[in-house]
Amino acid sequence: MSAKYIIGALAGSFALAYIFDKSIADYKIFGGTTPKTVSDKEWWEATDKKFQAWPRTAGPPVVMNPISRQNFIVKSSDS
């Protein structure tokens, strides 16, 4: 019996969160505008082209050890 109340409350809270998010972010009830960099497709394509044109330089691959939180350099098996 309590499961239907929990599921109903979860569904209601998700519905409320969706309505609030939609009204604040999309309908801009508190004012504001969408930046041109978000809405302009040409700007997005030019920026993407610029980032793809940059030379990529990096060090050796690194693996994160989640237990000790230390970085270790990955070495190939032949070296």
Image (cartoon, helix red, strand yellow):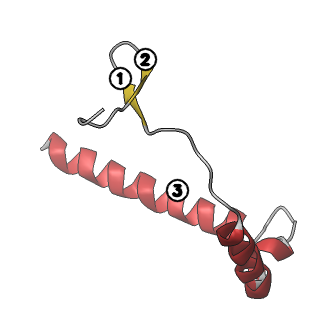
User: Is residue 10 in sight in this rendering?
Assistant: yes
Of marks 3 and 2, which one's residue comes earlier in the chain? 3
Neighbours of disc 2 within 10 Å: few (<14), some (14-19), many (20+): few
Q: In this view, does 50 lie above or below 11?
A: below
Residues at marks 1 and 2 touching, judged by CB atoms closer than 8 Å: yes
Q: Which residue type carries mark 3? A: Ala
Residues at marks 1 and 3 touching, judged by CB atoms closer than 8 Å: no
Would you name the residue on which mark 1 appears?
A: 65
Quarter of the figure with residue 72: top left
Q: Quadrant of the N terminus?
A: top left
The total of numbered circles placed on residues is 3
Q: List the single residue furthest toward the front.
A: 79
| Discs 1/3, front | 1
Q: Which residue type carries mark 2? A: Arg
Residue 24, given in percent of the width and then of the height, sits at 71, 63
Quarter of the figure with residue 45: bottom right
Would you name the residue on which mark 3 appears?
A: 17
Neighbours of disc 3 within 10 Å: few (<14), some (14-19), many (20+): few
Q: Which residue type carries mark 1? A: Asn
Nearest the viewer among 63 and 67 is 63
Residues at marks 3 and 2 touching, judged by CB atoms closer than 8 Å: no
